[in-house]
Amino acid sequence: MQIETPPTERTTPKPEGERRGLVIVHTGDGKGKSTAAFGLALRAHGRGKPVKIYQFMKVPSARFGEHRMFEQLGIPIEGLGDGFSWKSKDLDHSAQLARDGWEKAKASILSGEHFMVTLDEITYPLIYGWLPLDDVLITLRTRPKEVHVVLTGRRCPPELIELADTVTEMTLIKHAFKAGVPAQRGIED
């Protein structure tokens, strides 16, 4: 490891633009996309801002760690799907759940009632062709200017990346799963 001298002066100019709602994307094959989005939701909630989280691939009855904590904090989180696609008994039904869920999420975004709306794992129903990408793009472009939208999931469509204000790609370097360690409570759920 190389030791660096900490900077003693700001090296970038201070932005002077208008504050506005952002489209933020967390994508890539690395771990932490949803976790980063939930961190933003917690930060906004901590500032007294109304937040709504939609999870496109989770069942409405899910009780993962984030659901338990958000419930205690009063942050609404809603599962819109029926779980992993490979566990689905009816992919047409899974697709319909995604479409119905998108209509709920779209209404939340366009209502302007929330400071932040999180669309967790939305890239999957997009890349499976279950949701119309154009409708998502139009909604993001026409949303009230103060509404922040956070989108997560692998293989984010390039059109969403182009539209977004901030995009972070989580890069997989190493994962315990590849060494045979199964998912664990409190880490993956």
Image (cartoon, rainbow, N blue to C red):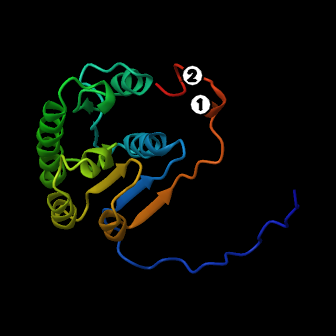
Q: Position of residue 60 (x, y in %)?
A: 23, 24
Q: Which type of secondary structure does the marked residue at label 2 adopt?
A: loop
Quadrant housing residue 133:
bottom left
Q: Which circle marks residue 44 in the picture? A: none
Q: Position of residue 163 (x, y in %)?
A: 31, 69
Q: Are marks 2 and 1 in contact (CB under 8 Å)?
A: yes
- Which residue is rendered at x = 19% and y = 33% of the image? 91
Q: Is residue 73 above or below residue 156?
A: above
Classed neighbour count for the residue bearing mark 2: other residues with Cα under 10 Å, few (<14), some (14–19), many (≥20): few
CA distance for labels 2 and 1: 6 Å
Q: Is residue 108 above or below residue 136?
A: above
- Which residue is rendered at x = 43% and y = 64% of the image? 166
Quadrant housing residue 38:
top left
- Which residue is rendered at x = 43% and y = 46% of the image? 40
Residue nearest the viewer, comparing 69 with 132: 132
Q: Is residue 126 above or below residue 3?
A: above
Q: Which residue is mark 1?
A: 177
Q: Is residue 159 above or below residue 29?
A: below
Classed neighbour count for the residue bearing mark 1: other residues with Cα under 10 Å, few (<14), some (14–19), many (≥20): few
Quadrant housing residue 178:
top right
Q: Position of residue 156 (x, y in %)?
A: 37, 56
Horizontally, residue 27 falls left or right of residue 164, namely right
Residue nearest the viewer, comparing 112 with 93: 93
Amino acid type for the residue under numbered disc 2 = Pro
Q: Position of residue 83 (x, y in %)?
A: 30, 27
Q: Which residue is mark 2?
A: 182
Amino acid type for the residue under numbered disc 1 = Phe
Residue 122 in sight here: yes
Nearest to N terminus: mark 2 or mark 1: 1
Horizontally, residue 154 falls left or right of residue 9, namely left
